[in-house]
Image (tube, grey):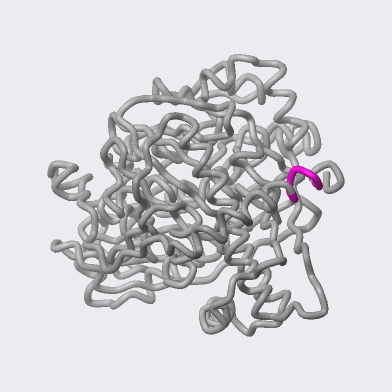
């Protein structure tokens, strides 16, 4: 058995994968996000650890006793700051936190070569601007920082006692020279930090340490190796078999990501496309990222009185009517690709007395699809050819939404076995690779296709007419909403 653990934003997922790559058990423990001020998004790192232990111990006791290795994946960019004796100094500032917009401008001005080194523009979601914000606004806390860890790497520290991270997750801090796969002293100096405050870097399929004896006993697993793992998107790519140049997937989670694997470093920062290291040696990847995808639909579900988000998907499917004059802008936490605008706001437009709960459900699904399509266009602007995409993440459960997405993008979508637990499955694969010396291509095969959703010609035509209005709503209101 191989144990994959994904430290997500809304919950921690743990899965057990056997030698035949079958998911034999899985469990989830929920997490909540705190928003104490506008644009702020935080979590208590101790909650990650508690949820991880809960998720692991909820797995079948006999099966987890046969675990050979553990892999980690997790939400990217979260700033977990520790003092001496590994004391957490403050709540972790998360990937969808937008408070550090001014610091991003400062970083770009003070180091014009930053995009060339890091492969990305400075954006509030990344870790480095968060630390510059802390230096300016919380100097007493900043002065006590001994280590800065990403969410999954804080969990690793609790598991093994090691300060370690992988290339893919660390590339999202903005402190790395992404081409050289190493920390950048120049960018660290911008935030008055050094390599000594960073974890040691590993490739995702390398072992970083072993599970502590007391944790192994508590979890009911052997004292096994723990591998570096990957950021959630890179780990999801490993899980979906997206490991060769040109392979791609779309992740429908809290955020929405379109991911393309590459065998070379090809940055295009000015289009707000992300370029990071992959979780496997010698590979990189490009991403378009929107900050509120399934979470934006969850928001509309709550706003409009659905008992559960799943009820919104079911209602829209049953109604099966395009939203016509109603539009939803899903920019609830600002936006990255293609707008790079932390001040972007969400909106419902075109409401009338005839607007129903079903109409709003449909508008939510269409609005997120349109925003994802903007990111797809940004990737195509780099010269990428995207003939199809695999689908992973919790939003993969809705085939009706899949029809909307495929028709908006104009390409087929492949839904694969295990799609809803993609990053955790990828983490389990990385765990396997870390101890077996198998060929990557032999392990990281695409899971079997369960079904394919092709574009609907009528919906394609309708959405093609609606998308320009969607775009104009953002551009015509962004100054008002800043």
Q: x, y percentage for residue 157?
A: 45, 48
Q: Residue at x 22, y 73 (%)?
A: 63
Q: x, y percentage for residue 322?
A: 59, 70
Q: Is residue 184 magenta?
A: no
User: Quadrant of the image for the C terminus?
Assistant: top right
Q: x, y percentage for residue 116?
A: 53, 18
Q: Is residue 476 above or below residue 463?
A: above
Seen from the viewer's position, the closer of residues 455 and 360 is 455
Q: Is residue 97 above or below residue 9?
A: above
Q: Is residue 474 magenta?
A: yes
Seen from the viewer's position, the closer of residues 479 and 219 is 479
User: Residue 306 falls in which quadrant of the image?
Assistant: bottom right
User: Residue 98 falls in which quadrant of the image?
Assistant: top right
Q: Which residues are magenta?
A: 473-477
Task: State left or right for residue 199 relative to residue 322.
Answer: left
Task: State left or right for residue 370 relative to residue 217.
Answer: right
The tally of labels here is 0
Q: Main secondary structure of the magenta part?
A: helix
Q: Residue at x 42, y 44 (%)?
A: 259
Task: State left or right for residue 287 relative to residue 271.
Answer: left
Seen from the viewer's position, the closer of residues 350 and 462 is 462
Q: Is residue 204 above or below residue 266?
A: below
Q: Residue at x 19, y 42 (%)?
A: 440
Name the residue at the right extreme: 480
User: Residue 188 falls in which quadrant of the image?
Assistant: top right
Q: Is residue 199 visible?
A: yes
Q: Residue at x 44, y 53 (%)?
A: 410
Q: Is residue 175 visible?
A: no
User: Quadrant of the image for the N terminus?
Assistant: bottom left
Q: Is residue 292 above or below residue 309?
A: above
Q: x, y percentage for residue 2?
A: 24, 60
């Amino acid at each position: 058995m191989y144990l994959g653990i994904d430290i997500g934003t809304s919950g921690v997922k743990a899965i057990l994968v056997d030698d035949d790559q079958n998911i034999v058990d899985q469990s989830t423990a929920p997490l909540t996000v705190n928003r104490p001020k506008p644009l702020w998004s935080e979590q208590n790192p101790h909650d990650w650890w508690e949820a991880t232990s809960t998720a692991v111990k909820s797995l079948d006791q006999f099966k987890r006793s046969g675990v050979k290795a553990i892999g980690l994946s997790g939400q990217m960019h979260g700033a977990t700051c520790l003092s001496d004796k590994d004391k957490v100094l403050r709540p972790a500032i998360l990937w969808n936190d937008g408070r550090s917009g001014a610091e991003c401008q400062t970083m770009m001005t003070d180091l014009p070569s930053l995009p060339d080194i890091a492969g990305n523009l400075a954006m509030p979601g990344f870790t480095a601007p968060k630390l510059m914000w802390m230096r300016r606004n919380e100097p007493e806390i900043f002065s006590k920082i001994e280590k800065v860890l990403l969410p999954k790497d804080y969990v690793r520290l609790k598991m093994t006692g090691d300060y370690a991270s992988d290339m893919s997750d660390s590339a999202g801090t903005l402190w790395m020279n992404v081409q050289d796969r190493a920390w950048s002293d120049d960018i660290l100096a911008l935030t008055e930090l050094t390599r000594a405050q960073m974890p040691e870097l590993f490739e995702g399929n390398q072992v970083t340490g072993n599970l502590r004896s007391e944790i192994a006993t508590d979890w009911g697993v052997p004292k096994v190796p723990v591998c570096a793992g990957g950021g959630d998107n890179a780990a999801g790519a490993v899980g979906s078999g997206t490991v060769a140049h040109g392979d791609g997937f779309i992740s429908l989670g809290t955020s929405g990501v379109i991911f393309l694997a590459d065998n070379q470093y090809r940055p295009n920062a000015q289009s707000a496309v992300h370029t990071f290291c992959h979780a496997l040696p010698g590979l990189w990847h490009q991403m378009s990222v929107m900050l509120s995808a399934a979470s934006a639909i969850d928001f509309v579900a709550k706003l409009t009185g659905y008992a559960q988000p799943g009820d919104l998907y079911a209602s829209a499917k049953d109604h099966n009517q395009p939203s016509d004059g109603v539009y939803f802008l899903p920019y609830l936490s600002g936006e990255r690709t293609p707008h790079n605008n932390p001040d972007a706001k969400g909106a419902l437009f075109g409401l009338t007395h005839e607007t129903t709960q079903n109409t709003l459900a449909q508008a939510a699904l269409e609005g997120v699809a349109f925003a994802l399509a903007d990111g797809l266009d940004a990737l195509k602007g780099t010269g990428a050819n995207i003939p199809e995409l695999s689908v992973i993440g919790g939003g993969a459960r809705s085939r009706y939404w899949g029809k909307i997405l495929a028709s908006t993008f104009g390409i087929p979508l492949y839904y694969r076995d295990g799609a809803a637990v993609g990053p955790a499955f990828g983490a389990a694969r990385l765990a396997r690779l870390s101890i077996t010396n198998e060929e990557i291509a032999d392990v990281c095969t695409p899971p079997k296709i369960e079904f394919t959703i092709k574009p609907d010609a009528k919906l394609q035509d309708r959405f093609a007419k609606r998308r320009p209005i969607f775009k104009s709503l953002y551009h015509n209101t962004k100054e008002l909403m800043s």
